[in-house]
Amino acid sequence: VEEEETVAGRFEQEVVLPPGEPKDVPLQVELDLVRFFEDDLRGLVDLASAIVQNEPPQTVKLRVQPTVNTSLGPIEYPSPITVVSKRAGRDASQP
């Protein structure tokens, strides 16, 4: 949310993604927003206000940093990949 990492996790088992085919990958995630924003309660208020459309929109992104198993061993991507980036809140469709 607004360039701050809010959740992180790992798959407990390998997930195979066939090349060129979309595939749903279920992932259980828990997030304690109060704990995350304990140092910046204003950030939590801004996000909640944007969702109910009282404040300017907030940017929410899903980023992953996969590890690919190869015959040479696992190779981790050097930096995260942005899978989804959306604006949430009032006038979110505007740049």
Image (spheres, rainbow, N blue to C red):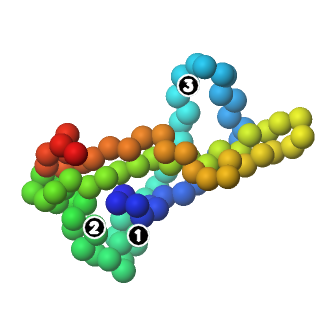
Q: Quadrant of residue 71?
A: top right
Residue that carries the numbered disc 2 in the rendered image:
44
Q: Nearer the viewer, residue 61 or 28?
A: 61
Residue that carries the numbered disc 3 in the rendered image:
23
Residue displayed at 18% across by 43% down: 94
Residue displayed at 32% across by 77% down: 40
Q: Nearer the viewer, residue 42 or 27?
A: 42
Q: Is residue 31 above or below residue 82?
A: below
Q: Is residue 23 above or below residue 37?
A: above
Alpha carbons under labels 2 and 3: distance apart: 32 Å
Please, what is the three-letter code of the amino acid marked with disc 2? Leu
* Lower sequence index among marks 2 and 3: 3
Considering every residue shown, the one lying at the far top of the view is 21
Alpha carbons under labels 1 and 3: distance apart: 30 Å
* Lower sequence index among marks 2 and 1: 1
Please, what is the three-letter code of the amino acid marked with disc 3? Lys
Residue 36, label in figure:
1
